[in-house]
Image: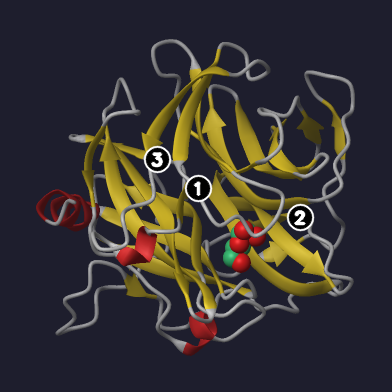
Amino acid sequence: MRNIPWQEKPKNSNEIIWRYDKNPIIGRYDIPSSNSIFNSAVVPFKDGFAGVFRCDNKAVQMNIFAGFSKNGIDWKIDHEVIKMKEGNTDMIESDYKYDPRVVFIDDRYWITWCNGYNGPTIGIGYTFDFKEFFQCENAFLPFNRNGVLFPKKINGKYAMLSRPSDNGHTPFGDIYVSYSPDMKYWGEHRCVMKATPFEDSAWQSTKIGAGPIPILVDDGWLMIYHGVVTTCNGFRYAMGAAILDENDPSVVKYRTQEYILGPAVDYEMVGDVQNVVFPCAALHNLEEDKIAIYYGAADTVVALSFGHISEIVKFTKEKSL
Ligand code: BMA
């Protein structure tokens, strides 16, 4: 594993997750067409990193763009939108694309995103080189958001987390896991975890959705997720962590009662949508016990944060609901 972006925890900090001190790493106008760049996904690629970025344009149409970086912090994002070719099905409609996730499985990089097909559902595609992209069958019926693949097959099948939703600013949402033998047909849908009762943990009481690709640790799958509370001024999105059983991820072993990162600095609290911290990707190095979490801030920019995996796991176990 190459060097991932890293910055030591500030002295005297007792945070589980701390922010990069030069945040945000990607600005809203970083490509000529963009109104905002956020909720984006990165992976190790060749001797550096590649990613799929959500860049809404100035008509505020949502779409995804490829990007490349040597160090995971300074990014060159293509000015042209990703154009899909036919994957494992006939070319299907896509009114918009947003909130991508990327993961390498077997021989290629798989991409999932929220795909506009008579409302939001989960689109799937793949690429070998981040130049040519192939669109596959949608995973689910509308409406659904936050499709997040596991990085390897579980019991011989591809596995994906998602959040069934409605066509609007969904006021509910629980995390499910689904399985597929071939990345085309999905089934065996099982509930993983639900939004909490308000009095137990208010920050995640309206809806929850998977964030980065889960990471396999000794205790199971470390799943970083977003949780939402409805306030008198609308939704507030924060970040939490859970540990799911390795062989049956519908079994939740631990789940944080407290959030691990909440909107608290200007670029998270002020933007097109205030008070949003929305993780979509993480780079990690288990030997060095490091994780770099990429998140959308206020639906406007991309920011970076860091943590020690062992501390996140310990916190998740000790402060579990
Ligand atoms: C969700 C999606 C995300 C966004 C979030 C907060 O429904 O649209 O892209 O970050 O709302 O506005």
**Is 291 drawn above or below residue 93 in the view shown?**
below
- x, y percent for residue 255: 24, 48
Answer above or below: position of 270 versus 71: below
Residue at numbered disc 2: 65
Q: Look at the image and tell me whether residue 48 can be seen.
A: no
- In screen coordinates, is 173 left or right of 204? right
Checking the image for residue 253, the label placed there is: none
Foreground mark, 3 or 2?
3
Nearest to viewer (mark 1 / mark 3): 1
Three-letter amino acid code at disc 3?
Pro
Q: Earlier in the sequence, mark 1 or mark 3?
A: 1
Tag 1: amino acid: Gly
Look at mark 3 in the image and give the residue it sits on.
214
Q: Nearer the viewer, mark 2 or mark 1?
A: 1
The quadrant holding residue 109 is top right
Quadrant containing the N terminus is top left
Residue position for label 1 = 173
Choose between 236 and 22: the one closer to the eye. 236
Side of 211 relative to 197 (left or right): right
- Place residue 227 in its image quadrant: bottom left
Badge 2 density bin: few <14, some 14–19, many ≥20, Cα 10 Å: many
